[in-house]
Image (cartoon, grey):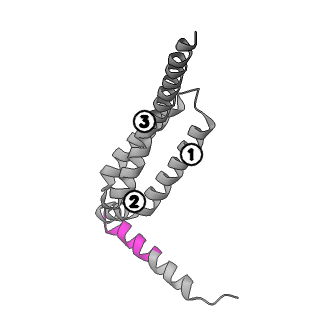
Amino acid sequence: MKKYILPALLALSMMSFQSCQSNQSRIDDLKDLVEEIQDNGKDYSAEQWEEASAKFDELLEKINSYDDLSQEELEEVAKLQGQYAATVFKNSGKAIMEEMEKAGSALGGFVKGFSEGLDETEDEPEE
């Protein structure tokens, strides 16, 4: 009887480990995408940002379709969403400005006026 307990415990522990591994791998694709964007996003064009955003939305939709996510997984997904948003905000400005410059001189004039307006308000003394 004792000789069957050890193999049974070993089998249970292996199944448990595989279950944890497969659950974590459901988030790994999202994590890999966020890391890729953090590493290379500063050089992305507007088109690349659109592709990255579509891929991010696709992965997030897939993850949200799972009803058995643990609290830890949910927290990890929320953290990745925050990291993605911060990276997009930080790095996509260059691509947006390039697109605005391509749009024409009227829009370029707006941007120039907006920038000058910001500079003027910084010089005003506080009351």
Please state which of the two labelled residues, at mark 1 or mark 2, is closer to the viewer.
1
Residue 3, compared with residue 63, is above or below; it is: above
Q: Amino acid at mark 1?
A: Ala
**Disc 3, SS:** helix
Tell how many labels.
Answer: 3
**Disc 2, SS:** helix
C-alpha separation, residue under disc 2 versus residue under disc 3: 20 Å
Q: Find residue 97 and name its label.
A: none
- The residue segment tinted magenta is 104-114
**Disc 1, SS:** helix
Q: Find residue 92 and name its label.
A: 2
The residue at the point 50 percent across, 48 percent down is 80
- The quarter of the rendered structure image containing the C terminus is bottom right
- Front one among 123 and 3: 3
Residue 10, compared with residue 77, is above or below; it is: above
Q: Amino acid at mark 3?
A: Glu
The residue at the point 59 percent across, 88 percent down is 124
Kindly give the residue lying farthest to the right in the view shown.
127
Q: Are marks 2 and 3 in contact (CB under 8 Å)?
A: no
- Can you identify the residue that label 1 sits on? 78
The mark that comes first in sequence, 2 or 3, is: 3
Q: Amino acid at mark 2?
A: Ser
Q: Is residue 50 left or right of residue 9?
A: left
